[in-house]
Amino acid sequence: MLIRTEAPADILPTDALLKSVFDTDAEANLVMKLRENSRRTLSLVACNDDGEIVGHVMFSPVTVAGVDNNWQGLAPLAVKKEYQGQGIGSRLIEEGLSSLREFGYPVCVVLGDPDYYSRLGFSAAKDVGLNCQWDVREGAFQVQFLTAEIDTNRHAKGSALVEYSAEFSEL
């Protein structure tokens, strides 16, 4: 399994993957809009031995209390149905987080299953005073600090709102 940065030739196969994995075209449309509006920080694909794209993950900017501190949001993550359960999603996320660290991005947030994402180093965002812009189930909004320079207690006294790019509100 090869994990690499998405190339222009991957756009249509990635779009087809997203449309096949999710119940609606919303995530595929989101990814396309993030690309078109230059709101993509990092986009990775996983390819099988035949070069077919079987997985995809995207990271895009988020703001904290209205400020852009180079924080990133992970979304969406997709793995072709017949390849799920083989660790491809985890590998995509780990590679993405490693790249974000190398590029100097300090924090990544995600909205998803706490059991899944906690295995990858995410923890409840509310524990450090961070809230999602949407009403989400308990524990679903999570954070991972990627650089040692971040003070994990910085927001603990208050409640800082984390907001995704406007494109997410169209979901």
Image (cartoon, rainbow, N blue to C red):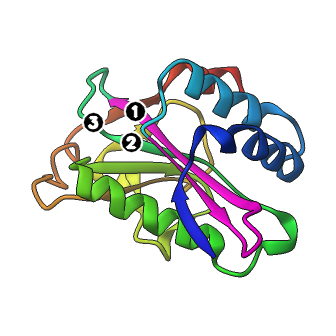
Q: Quadrant of residue 55?
A: bottom right
Looking at the image, the residue that sits furthest to the left is 149
Pointer 3 residue: 70
Pointer 2 residue: 72
Q: Main secondary structure of the magenta part?
A: strand
Q: Quadrant of residue 35?
A: top right
Give the amino acid at mark 1: Val
Pointer 1 residue: 62
Tag 1 and tag 3, C-beta contact below 8 Å:
no
Is 108 situated left or right of 56 in this image?
Answer: left
The mark nearer the N terminus, 1 or 3, is: 1
Q: Position of residue 98 (x, y in %)?
A: 34, 64
Crowdedness near tag 2: few (<14), some (14–19) or many (≥20) residues, C-alpha within 10 Å: many
Q: Quadrant of residue 7?
A: top right
Give the amino acid at mark 3: Asn
Q: Which residues are magenta?
A: 42-63
Tag 2 and tag 3, C-beta contact below 8 Å:
yes
In whole angstroms, how far apart are the C-alphas of marks 2 and 3?
A: 6 Å
Quarter of the figure with the N terminus:
bottom right
In whole angstroms, how far apart are the C-alphas of marks 1 and 3?
A: 7 Å
